[in-house]
Image (cartoon, helix red, strand yellow):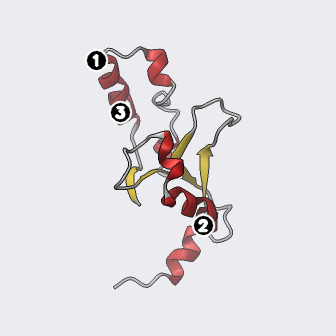
Amino acid sequence: MHLVSAYRSVDRQAGLIRRKLDAGRSLDAILEVLAPPGCSEHHTGRAVDIGTGDLRPLEPDFDRAPAFAWLGVHAHRFGFGLSFPRGNAFGYVYEPWHWCFSETGDRSFRDFESTARFP
């Protein structure tokens, strides 16, 4: 399991969209998979996109990876939740790789930090 993306500035988000427009994609198609600048959870610094070495990043089949199963069982303990499950209330596409931190987990990140042992 590895980090694919985390904090993203509004300018960076705009650049991602601009690159896709320059590659010939329609704005409607782009906005199905990328939030408009200023509307992404990545701007908050709380969102992460997770990948694995054996799958292409940011693809729906991430939900078949052992890492996704592990996240489903353990992520809430550290305050993370899947932002956009299938049929989510926001109407966004399913993003099994996109997890967001909030201190509503069984164990907050601060609790984890206080017990972690770093060399």
Rendered-image quadrant of the N terminus: bottom left
Q: Is residue 12 above or below residue 115?
A: above
Instruction: Determine whether label 2 and label 1 are within 8 Å by CB.
Output: no
Image x and y of residue 68, in percent? 53, 56
Residue depicted at 32% across the width and 14% down the height: 24
Name the residue type under label 1: Asp
Which of the two marks, 1 or 3, is nearer to us in this view?
1
Q: Which mark is residue 74?
A: 2
Q: Which mark is residue 11?
A: 3
Label 2, label 1: how far apart the Cα atoms are: 40 Å
Q: Is residue 34 visible?
A: yes
x, y percentage for residue 23? 28, 19
Name the spot of residue 13 as percent of width and height, x first: 39, 33
Q: Residues within 10 Å of mark 2 (few under 14, many from 20)?
A: some
Q: Is residue 22 above or below residue 7?
A: above
Q: Earlier in the sequence, mark 2 or mark 1?
A: 1
